[in-house]
Amino acid sequence: MWGEHYWYDTTDVWLHPRLSQYVPSEVLEPRAMRRPKAPHHHYNHINVATVAKEMQDLGLKVNSGGHGQREGLAMHWEMWMMAQGGMTPLEALRTATMSPAETLGLAKQIGSIKTGKLADLVVVDGDMSQDIRISDRVIYTMINGRLYDAETMNEVGNYDNKRNKFYFEQ
């Protein structure tokens, strides 16, 4: 991920409410607390994101890719960086939804909300079209049409199917 160090430098990753709840502290804290520091002009990701915006304006598809770093937070960072390069929140969101689906030839199945598509989505607390930085405020996750409460990770409406505790919650 091209700007990962920036987010470790400028945010308190180990205090993220969802990560600190579901990632064991011995996994989260060493990388998040022992963070690099650099002057902001040393982070090149904003230049890269600016070029990505220029490419998108020319009609090229720009895709975000978090590569699995930091238990899902990396994909949010990717969208936030796109906005740092000049994309609107909706343009940045498109780099993580519709554009990748189109690039992979899966736009008929995923990438947007439409009858007949796979029901995999997240519900965010707030209006991402106004502020992309709230993308990590996920309150519900839907996978294959089944809705889960992001706070508890229990399926909504299926009270007999509570998740088991993780090893670090025992």
Image: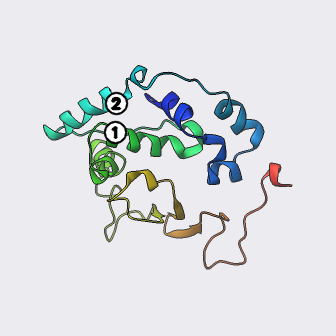
| Quadrant of the snapshot with the C terminus | bottom right
Marking on residue 84: 1
- Toward the viewer: 7 or 10? 10
Say which residue label 2 marks. 46
Toward the front, the furthest residue is: 39
Q: Amino acid at mark 2?
A: Ile
* x 55%, y 36%: residue: 69
Residue closest to the far left: 58
Q: Is residue 141 placed above or below 94 in the rendered structure?
A: below
Q: Position of residue 29 (x, y in %)?
A: 71, 36
Label 2 vs label 1: CA separation?
A: 6 Å
Say left or right for 86 vs 24.
left
Residue displayed at 70% across by 53% down: 21
**What sort of colour scheme is used for the picture?**
rainbow
Number of other residues with Cα within 10 Å of mark 1, as a class: few under 14, some 14 to 19, many 20 or more: some
**Residue pictured at 40% horizontal, 62% vertical:** 118
* Disc 2 to disc 1: CB gap under 8 Å: yes
Give the percent coordinates (x, y) of residue 87: 26, 44
Element type where label 2 sits in the image = helix
Quarter holding residue 120: bottom left
57 lies above or below 155: above
Image location of residue 66, percent across then percent down: 47, 38
Question: Who's the residue at 45% across and 54% down the image?
Answer: 135
- Kindly state the secondary structure of the residue where label 1 is placed: helix
In this rendered view, identify the residue nearer to me: 150 or 131.
131
Left or right of 134 on screen, residue 50: left
